[in-house]
Amino acid sequence: MIMKKTLLLIVLIYPALLYGQIDTQAGIDWQTFLAKQDPVREKLPQKFDHGAFLGNGLLGTTIFQDGQQQIRFEIGRSDVTDHRRDNGRLPVGGLLLKTAGQIRSGTLRTDLWNAEVRGEITTDRGDDHREKRGLLF
């Protein structure tokens, strides 16, 4: 056991000692770089599998339009599974955002740098441009 730990330590540390510290700065503006990689949906997803995903590897949520007047936040855990569903995972909860009017259009953007999803929804009763923050995971 001690031999395995020593070998693992050597394998992980040796490259850093050999080549010096890894330059994590390297003059790269990571926020700008990641913004170019953000998944952007110009149309609201209509299915679970096409929704905007957020999570930390254990707990996650998928955001998609579920009907004419609601956005669904389907919440799940990667360790809660069952063989009866097509993707094997069972939802552990969810939230519904019900709109006053029927949804006409909308967009979603997964901001990789800030680990959040932002979106805009237009209904037959107009837009709501007030910024609302919440649903932090």
Image (tube, rainbow, N blue to C red):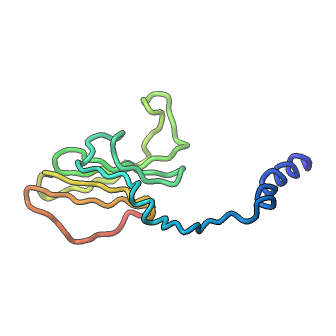
Q: Quadrant of the C terminus?
A: bottom left
Give how far across and how far down residue 4 sits, in percent: 87, 46
Give how far across and how far down residue 6 sits, in percent: 88, 52
Count numbered badges in the picture. 0
Is 6 situated left or right of 99 in this image? right
Give how far across and how far down residue 80 sits, in percent: 52, 41
Identified at 12% across, 56% down, the residue is: 123
Is 80 situated left or right of 94 in this image? right
Identified at 80% across, 58% down, the residue is: 18
* Residue furthest to the left: 124
Identified at 21% across, 55% down, the residue is: 98
**Which one is nearer the viewer's eye here, 90 or 46?**
46
**Which one is nearer the viewer's eye here, 112 or 73?**
112
Q: Is residue 99 above or below residue 77?
A: below
* Residue furthest to the bottom: 130
Is 67 situated left or right of 49 in this image? left
**Which one is nearer the viewer's eye here, 119 or 112?**
112
* Residue furthest to the right: 3
**Which one is nearer the viewer's eye here, 63 or 13?**
13
Identified at 15% across, 57% down, the residue is: 122
